[in-house]
Image (tube, rainbow, N blue to C red):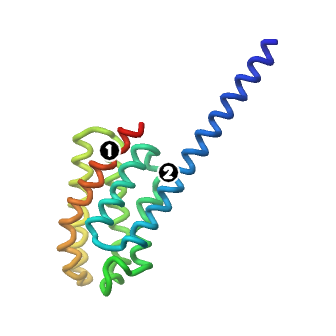
Amino acid sequence: MLYLYMEREGRIKIDLLIKKLNLENITLFSIYSLSILIPLIIGKPQLLVGSAVNFLITYSTLKFGIKRIIPILILPSITAYLTGLLLGSTTIFLLYLIPFISFSNFLYSLFIRKKKYISYLSAIVLKGVFLLLSYYLLNRLISLPKVFLASSCLQFVTATIGLITGVLFYKVTE
């Protein structure tokens, strides 16, 4: 009798675990999809696209951790490059920037996962400074158009908007 009770309770726990995993996988797949669709469908302005992508990075980092969100750190830049929507004639230079943007997103995510106000501020500053320095170096080394240098200041704004909205959404939904 005790064995049957334990077996039934074990099945209930397994069923609940499967439902939870499926919901998490669906949510994660949806976020992966959004990370592709946002630059593809919205395209411009950078303020909106960048803020939305940073929101996805922030929320998904807090909810799933860094390992499970690596595609979200990379896919938006690749999508923007492949579609050519975001930067028009300078899109070819985005190919050189993808590794730097992806690494800045990783830095951003790395600090966000600590869930402390100082780490949130560090995430914004490190991402923005890293991209600013990268764009400056690439401007000197390969004549990266100055439009990228000018747009690097916007990285601080989009990171801030994305972080604030992502953290708030995470807190409301948890």
Mark 1 to mark 2 CA distance (whole Å): 18 Å
SS at mark 1 in the image: helix
> Which residue is pictured at 37% across the width and 70% down the height?
42
> Which residue is pictured at 31% across the width and 64% down the height?
50
Q: Is residue 123 left or right of residue 174?
A: left
For the residue marked with disc 2, what is the amino acid? Arg
Residue 139, image x and y in percent?
A: 22, 79
Residue 111, image x and y in percent?
A: 31, 47
Looking at the rendered structure, the number of numbered marks drawn on it comes to 2
Residue 29, image x and y in percent?
A: 54, 56
Q: Is residue 2 left or right of residue 69?
A: right
The residue labelled by disc 1 is: 167
- Quadrant containing the N terminus is top right
Q: Is residue 29 left or right of residue 87?
A: right
Circle 1 crowding by C-alpha within 10 Å: few under 14, some 14–19, many from 20: many
Q: Looking at the picture, does residue 6 appear above or below residue 124?
A: above
Q: Which mark is residue 68?
A: 2
The residue nearer to you, when weighing 113 against 100, is 113
> Which residue is pictured at 23% across the width and 54% down the height?
160
For the residue marked with disc 1, what is the amino acid? Val
Residue 148, image x and y in percent?
A: 23, 75
Toward the bottom, the furthest residue is 89
Q: Looking at the picture, does residue 97 appear above or below residue 122?
A: below
SS at mark 2 in the image: helix
Name the front one of labels 1 and 2. Answer: 1
Mark 1 or 2, nearer chain start: 2
Circle 2 crowding by C-alpha within 10 Å: few under 14, some 14–19, many from 20: few
Q: Looking at the picture, does residue 146 appear above or below residue 169?
A: below
The quadrant holding residue 12 is: top right
> Which residue is pictured at 31% across the width and 73% down the height?
44
- Quadrant containing the C terminus is top left
